[in-house]
Amino acid sequence: MNQRPLSPHLGVYRFAYTMALSILHRIMGGALSVGFLVLVWWLMALAQGPDAYADAVEVLGSGFFKLLLAGWALAYIYHFCNGIRHLIWDMGAGLERHQARRSGVIVVVATIILFAAFVWAVCSGTPVTE
Amino acid sequence: MSLRTPLGKVLGRGSAGDGVGHWWEQRVTAIALIPLTAWFAIGLLRRHAGKFEDMQAWLSQPTSALLALLLLVALAWHSKLGVQVIIEDYVRGKTAKTTLLLLSGYIHVVAAAAGIFAIVRLALA
């Protein structure tokens, strides 16, 4: 039983960008699981009252954490878009190679557009940053 | 000719022993998370996230609290299933694998309980 191979065997495949997208989906998912813990921590601070919340906001608003939050936003947007791609595959559609490549491009473009919209919303005076 | 036993065929649980439950739950939570996370992200962007009063006012409304509860449960579940697959695929050795799977499960349950408690407290305060 101990000799059974582990999956997936990344080393045996020729590189393709659809493969990079798949790997990225998993990495972003893992990052978002850590983000989920931060979300819960933030909610707990909110439930404890104004003082605890102010402390949490101070931590989350620091330069390092701002960068992390932007990273989580990007991870969420990508995982969201590519997740929809996966759900479409699960319905049995879009599985041909040229279709999978095209939907991969669509996911990347959609991610860039949505992340740009997010950055624009945050930087152009949406209330969230005040 | 199939090498599968008649009992195995009838049970339909496959070599991992738990059938399609994991796969199916991952999809069900994924679909639920499309509207729930979008609601939360847009709601957050439209408010003063740094202001306690704004966040409290938002999440203590009955509809928001209910959606936030659903979001937390779906998120915890989806995350637990995802981390489980990552551990199963990449961690070598039965001891390390089992330990990490248990740890991840406990962390997700604690996080979900904490999140639910926070929302309920906000909504009922």
Image (tube, rainbow, N blue to C red):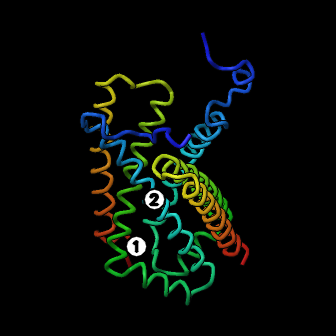
Quarter of the rendering containing residue A9: top left
Residue at image position (63%, 83%) is A48
Residue A105 lies, with reference to residue B70, above or below; the image says above
Q: Which mark is residue A91?
A: none
Quarter that holds the N terminus of chain B:
top right
User: What element does badge 2 sit on?
Assistant: helix
Q: Earlier in the sequence, mark 1 or mark 2?
A: 2
At label 1, the amino acid type is Pro
Residue at image position (39%, 25%) is A95
Q: Mark 1 and 2 residues: CB-CB less than 8 Å, in contact?
A: no
Quarter of the rendering containing residue A100: top left
Residue designated by label 1: A127
Q: Name the chain letter of the residue that bears numbered label 1.
A: A
How crowded pointer 1 is (Cα within 10 Å; few <14, some 14-19, many 20+) is rated as: some
Residue at image position (48%, 24%) is A92
At label 2, the amino acid type is Leu
Is B64 displayed left or right of A19 in the figure? right
User: What element does badge 1 sit on?
Assistant: helix
Residue designated by label 2: A32
Residue that sits furthest to the top in the current view: B1
**Which x, y percent locates residue B105?**
63, 59
